[in-house]
Amino acid sequence: MLTESPKHSDHPNIDASNNLSTSTAKNVDSGTDESSSMNPQVIGEDNCSLEETEQMVKPTSARDTICALSGHSFLRKSLSKPAYCHHCGEVIWSPLSTGFACDVCNFLSHERCLREIVTVCPAYASTQILTPVAHCWSELSFFRRKFCNVCRIRLRDTPSVRCEVCEYYAHYDCKEFAVNDCKQGAAFRAQKNRNKTTTSHHWREGNLRSSTRCCICKKLCGSSECLTGYRCLWCGTTAHASCSRKLPVECDFGPLRNIMLPPWAVSLPRPDIPSEYTVGIMRRPQTVPNYLLVSCLK
């Protein structure tokens, strides 16, 4: 005579639910969760370091990496005529050529250049500046051979403005969206030690001469077809966007370092102090001439 074993039942779903509830109860008692123990990307699992965790969390594509680092919103674009990459300055064109264009700032790039892009989108760069410095705009004028640093389109016959300090060009309509990253010429602070103070390169993109060469690879880095190439506003060093990473962060002010006044040696005057004390010029006391006194007595 066959007897039914008490360890098994005719309903496998009930057994599975019982097993699941048992395992869940064990995890609750031990203070852990089953989902977290099986996730390899949880920080602290198996005593893994933060670097190992970052290596496990890999982006799905190069486009996701660029969007996370530089803030661009790239879309694949089919090109019907030759165009130039804003990163390397080379042409993008073939019978079946496609490029990647930013939907915000019109940054155009090869697919192979996506992982090396250094330029930050203006919509994202405003949130990354630690010390914003406003531009000193010129009057409306026409800069036909220059490119706008905001929308990256040639200025042509459109009224535009130019920063008198850092050579930042922009359409009049794009001026409101310009990044406030002008060259900081006065950075003196009394509590800082001057001997340990250093200045980093202040890069400005594009609007270089076509004959400008990179200081690293000695190739042409300027272009009259697109906004490409970098130039330091302090030392005047020019380089490709990718080559600028190979240069040291600290700027030595170039060949004019002996006669150049560093920014950490200059301070802005306080607005609550009269300009006579700031400049060091004392006004003469106002006295009434003698002939006026005589005329008044008469």
Image (spheres, helix red, strand yellow):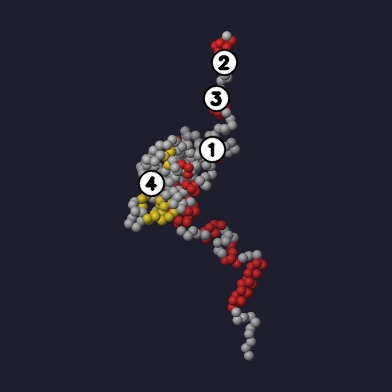
Q: Which of marks 3 and 1 is nearer the N terminus?
A: 1
Q: Earlier in the sequence, mark 4 or mark 1?
A: 1
> Is 26 placed above or below 246 here?
below
Q: Kindly give the residue lying farthest to the bottom in the view shown.
A: 1
Which amino acid type corresponds to the residue marked 3 in the rendered image?
Answer: Ile
Q: Earlier in the sequence, mark 4 or mark 3?
A: 4
Q: Residues within 10 Å of mark 1 (few under 14, many from 20)?
A: few
Q: Marks 2 and 1: in contact by CB < 8 Å?
A: no
Compare residues 44 and 59 and report the one nearer the observer. 59
Residue 187's tag is 1
* Residue linked to disc 4: 226
Q: How crowded is mark 3: few (under 14 residues within 10 Å), some or many (20 or more)?
A: few
Q: Marks 1 and 3: in contact by CB < 8 Å?
A: no
- The image shows residue 26 at horizontal and vertical percentages of 65, 69
Q: Which of marks 1 and 2 is nearer the N terminus?
A: 1
- The image shows residue 206 at horizontal and vertical percentages of 41, 44
Which amino acid type corresponds to the residue marked 2 in the rendered image?
Answer: Val
Q: Circle 2 — which element?
A: loop
* Residue linked to disc 2: 288
Q: How far apart are marks 1 and 2 (CA)?
A: 44 Å
Residue drawn 36% across the image and 54% down it: 79
In front of the other: label 1 or label 2?
A: 2
Residue 281's tag is 3
Q: How far apart are marks 4 and 2 (CA)?
A: 65 Å
Q: Earlier in the sequence, mark 3 or mark 2?
A: 3
Residue drawn 51% across the image and 40% down it: 133
Q: Earlier in the sequence, mark 4 or mark 2?
A: 4
In front of the other: label 4 or label 2?
A: 2
